[in-house]
Structure formats: C-alpha cells, structure tokens
Image (cartoon, rainbow, N blue to C red):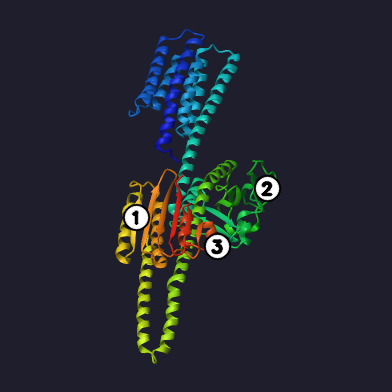
C-alpha cells in the first residue's frame, strides 16, 4: 500500500532532519576518533555534506512553500566517496546507518538489504587493504564486518517499522472512513470487508453478528470482486457455532490439512497464548468452505457480539501467520466503534420511522376514521328518516356535507405536513410569519406572533421540530379549542429556546399546570407534540383553565 502525500511528507522530513544530525556526528567522529591523520579532503567533503544537510533542514522549517529534497543518490555517492577518503570506520558507520534508514523508510526492503551487504563487504575490503596482513587481522575484519552487518540490519528494521507504522495508520484511517452512515449499512460493510480481504490477500471476508434480542444470526459475506452490496443472510442461532465457535474470547487462526488441521491463537483480553487450541466445529468448514482462516471477535459496548473472519480456500499460499492475526485483531478493534455507531444510528432511524408511523396511525384513527364512522351511523339513521321527514333529512345532509368538507381539509393538511420540510435558523422567522398569515386568512383566527431574537441560531433539526410543533399547536387550537385569539412567542437565550402558544379557547378537560410526564401518567395532552418535544430532548408544560383557554410551553436546551 502506497503512502499518501501527508505520510510521505512526514517521512521525508524525518529523513531530512536525520541527515543533518548524522552528518554532524560523522564529522565529530572523523576529527576526534580517527587514529590516523585526517585527510583535509575528507573533512572538506563531509563539511560540505553537513552544510547541504543543514540547508535542507532550514528550507524545510522556514520556507514551507519551497520543496527542497536531497535525492538518496547523493547520499549513496557521499557514502562511496567517504569510504575511500576516511581513515575512521566509525565516521563511515554513521553515514552508512543513515543511508540504510533512509532507504528503509521508502519501503524498499530488497534495496536496503543489498546496501547492507555491499557496505559490509566494502568496509572489510577497505580495512584489509590498509592493514598489513596477519592471521590475527582476520578476526578484526570479521568483527568489523559483523558489526556493520548487524547494525545495518537493525537500522533497516527500525526504518521499515516506521514505514509499516505509517502504512498501517493510513489503512486504519481509510477503512474507518468507509464506515459512514450516509453510505448505508450494507454498502459500508461491503467496502470495509472488501478492503480487509484485499489487505490480507484473502478470497472472502465474513461478518457474523448474533442479535440476542431478535434471536437471529446476521452474516455478511463479501468477496473483493463483488460489484454490488448484498444484505446479510438471516440465520437461526443454531448456525452460530459455525461462525462464532465455542468461545468468543479467543482470537484464532486455523489451517486445515490432513485430519482436523492445526491452529494458533490467544485470549483476546490478556494476550495469553492458548497452547492447545481446540479445532473449530465441523460445521465451520461446511459453511465457509475454508482451507485456512482467521477469526477475531468484534465488541459492542464492551460485550462480544460476533466475529470477523478472513477466509482462503487455497493453500499453502493462503496460510495465515501470527503477525497477520495480530494486525487483523488491531484492525477489528479499531473499526468496532464506528461500526457500532452505524448499527445504533440505523436502529434509531428505524425507531423514529416506527414512532412517526404510530403517530400517523393515531391521527388517522382519532380523526378521519372516527369521523367516517360517525358519518356512516348518521347516514344510516337518515336513510330511515328520509321517507317520513325529507326536509329534516336535507338539513342534516347539509351538516354532513360541511363535516366532510372539514375533514377533507384536515386530511389535506395532514398530507401536507407529512412532506419533507427543510427549516433553517435563517428562514425560521419568515416561515412562522407566513404560516400565521395563511392561518388567519383561511380560518379567521387571530394569531399574534412574537419572535424576540431576529437572528435565531438553532440546529436545523430543532428548527424543523419546533416549526412542526408550532403548526400542530395552531391546528389543535383551531380544531378543538374554539378560540378566537392565539398568542405565540418564540425566544432564545444561551441555554435554551422556548416556544409558548397561548389561546383564549375552552381549554383542556383538566385544570392546572402539568408536565409531559404528568400528562403521560394521566393519559392527557397532545400526543404528537409530546413525542416531538422528547425527540429533541425538550420539556413540555401545559396549563389549562377550562372555559378560559390554555397555554402550551416547549423548552429545548441548546447545550
């Protein structure tokens, strides 16, 4: 996996700074530790290299818009020239270790190993040429060569680990970015599992989640070549053993071969290796058709809920290692929180939809359906009256016609209210004024609207729900209160926003001041408004004085 520009720039800056430090150390070693006279040319060349390295550091720090990088070819050329000029092996070692580190941070391991091998041979030859041959010198040459080889491999390992760390961090950021609620649950899981399979060169990836509440096992199966997202298979808990095994506390890898196969793993909580790993159930191989696989537990709220599996059906190239399992375990732990958030948001959305459907169902049942039932009964009575009292029947028909017209208007309003509504702070005042004006002209009800702060600053969701509450409250006044005048106030401070609807109608059937919790216990009050208020974390208060009106107050915290 190639590093992106940010990670690559970070490594280049590390190398730029390391070059200056190592060049300075090499110059000190040349001047202080050399047992032979120092060639002026060697000191001059190394000093020039140090000046060049310091210049690169200063440009990088002071002129961010200027990109000045010393090519690695210059470092290798310097290494070769200095090997010839220097009488100090320790001074050469500093430059050699830097060159190895710089090459390893490019992710080029074969070239790094080749550099270590060539430099080891070169330093041995250099020392051997300058020393008079004695049999005892061979041990000296071997010691220098071995020190060069070990130190070079060690520095190369550090550079490679730095590259690998940045590469893995970039991968974690990438796979986390795929788990977005906007993408949808199935598409997010498909992309994330597909990336996992590609990262480990696996043929297939699985996500198995056991839902105890629904008593179902959900299994997503993804191949990197899958073009479209597929929903999960919904299985009974009897299939859980095939995907979850006996214990969710064990992270494990398994390779099937003659007989049951062999595996490795450890307790995911403590990291303690399991010496005798029990083989997976026979149903596992039947369900996933694996030749080898890795399985890691995924958590939700600190509780294991399922497994993520990477599967290969071919061997031996598809065999996984300890290092693969540890890296896989780290990835699963990293993606568990965003994946859990997607599940929670999906569940919240489903509950919201269900709540809205319940509200619509109640509105239809308490409104139009009750009216239709009443119309049916009245029409049946009129059918019997018509032959005897046609004039009275005509008068009653006119009343029924008026009722049908009223219910038609209410149904039309209800359908209009169900349409998606986008309300923002900047539009809130104008929308409320426009609705009040339309309400006055259509129903002849005096509505006085007072919005204290002309510049409202509210989240869009709160604006939307407040406007729906305002609209619902006015319709309730018109339909049930028989009021002639309504006063609406909207005010906001740093802590909360408050909406007050005060009418001079007949009030509710109860007298006094009640909160939404008290109204719930008494089964009183406007149900839709109570639910919308709770949905944004607000509080509802209703004050009623039968025959003298009612006041509805909604307060929503902003912090």
User: Residue 322, image x and y in percent?
Assistant: 60, 42
Q: Earlier in the sequence, mark 2 or mark 3?
A: 2
Image coords of residue 330 (percent x, y): 55, 42
Marks counted in the figure total 3
Q: Secondary structure at mark 3?
A: helix
**Residue 70 tag number:** none
Image-quadrant location for residue 329: top right
- Mark 2 lies on a secondary structure that is loop
Instruction: Kindly identify the residue that appears in the image at 37 percent across and 27 percent down.
Output: 69
- Residue at image position (47%, 49%) is 179
Residue under label 3: 522
Q: Quadrant of residue 286?
A: bottom right
Would you place residue 393 above or below residue 262 in this image? below
Q: Is residue 555 left or right of residue 428?
A: right
Q: Earlier in the sequence, mark 1 or mark 3?
A: 1
Q: Nearer the viewer, residue 273 or 341?
A: 341
Q: Bin the neighbour count of mark 1 within 10 Å (Cα to Cα): few under 14, some 14-19, many 20 and up.
A: some
Question: Dot 2, how many residues are within 10 Å of its Cα: few (below 14), some (14-19), or many (20+)?
Answer: some
Which residue extends farthest bottom?
Answer: 387
Q: Which residue is mark 1?
A: 449
């Amino acid at each position: 996996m190639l590093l992106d520009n940010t990670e690559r720039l970070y490594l280049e800056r590390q190398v730029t700074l390391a070059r200056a430090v190592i060049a300075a150390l090499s110059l000190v070693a040349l001047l202080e530790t050399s047992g032979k006279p120092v060639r002026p040319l060697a000191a001059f060349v190394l000093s020039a290299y140090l000046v060049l390295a310091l210049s690169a550091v200063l440009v990088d720090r002071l002129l961010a818009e200027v990109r000045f990088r010393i090519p690695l070819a210059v470092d290798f050329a310097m290494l070769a020239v200095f090997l010839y000029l220097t009488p100090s092996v320790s001074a050469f070692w500093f430059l050699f270790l830097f060159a190895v580190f710089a090459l390893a941070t490019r992710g080029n391991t074969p070239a790094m190993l080749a550099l270590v091998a060539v430099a080891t041979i070169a330093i041995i030859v250099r020392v051997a040429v300058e020393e008079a041959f004695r049999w005892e010198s061979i041990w000296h040459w071997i010691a220098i060569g071995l020190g060069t080889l070990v130190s070079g491999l060690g520095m190369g390992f550090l550079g490679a680990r730095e590259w690998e760390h940045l590469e893995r961090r970039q991968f974690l950021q990438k796979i986390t970015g795929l788990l977005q609620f906007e993408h949808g649950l199935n598409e997010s899981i498909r992309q994330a599992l597909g990336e996992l399979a590609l990262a480990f060169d696996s043929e297939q990836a699985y996500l198995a989640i056991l839902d105890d509440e629904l008593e179902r096992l959900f299994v997503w199966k993804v191949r990197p070549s899958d073009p479209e997202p597929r929903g999960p298979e919904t299985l009974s808990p009897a299939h859980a053993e095939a995907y979850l095994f006996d214990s969710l506390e064990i992270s494990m890898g398994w390779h099937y071969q003659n007989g049951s196969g062999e595996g490795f793993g450890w307790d995911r909580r403590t990291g303690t290796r399991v010496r005798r790993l029990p083989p997976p159930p026979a149903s596992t191989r039947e369900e996933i058709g694996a030749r080898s696989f890795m399985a890691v537990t995924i958590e939700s709220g600190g509780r294991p809920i399922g497994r993520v599996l990477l599967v290969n059906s071919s061997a031996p190239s598809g065999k996984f290692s300890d290092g693969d399992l540890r890296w896989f375990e780290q990835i699963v732990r990293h993606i568990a929180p965003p994946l859990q958030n997607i599940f929670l948001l999906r569940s919240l959305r489903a509950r919201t939809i269900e709540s809205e459907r319940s509200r619509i169902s109640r509105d239809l049942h308490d409104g139009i359906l009750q009216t239709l039932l009443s119309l049916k009964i009245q029409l049946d009575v009129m059918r019997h009256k018509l032959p005897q009292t046609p004039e009275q029947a005509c008068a009653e028909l006119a009343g029924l016609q008026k009722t049908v017209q009223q219910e038609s208007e209410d149904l039309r309003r209800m359908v209009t209210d169900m349409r998606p509504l986008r309300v923002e702070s900047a539009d809130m005042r104008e929308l409320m004024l426009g609705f009040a004006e339309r309400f006055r002209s259509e129903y002849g009800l005096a509505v006085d609207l007072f919005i204290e702060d002309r510049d409202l600053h509210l989240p869009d969701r709160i604006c939307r729900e407040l406007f729906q509450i305002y609209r619902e409250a006015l319709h309730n006044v018109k339909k049930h209160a028989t009021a002639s005048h309504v006063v609406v106030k909207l005010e906001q401070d740093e802590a909360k926003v408050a909406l007050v609807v005060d009418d001079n109608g007949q009030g509710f059937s109860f007298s006094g001041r009640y909160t939404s919790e008290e109204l719930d216990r008494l089964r009183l009050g406007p149900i839709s408004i109570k639910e919308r208020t709770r949905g944004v974390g607000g509080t509802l208060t209703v004050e009623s004085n039968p025959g003298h009106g009612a006041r509805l107050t909604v307060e929503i915290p902003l912090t």
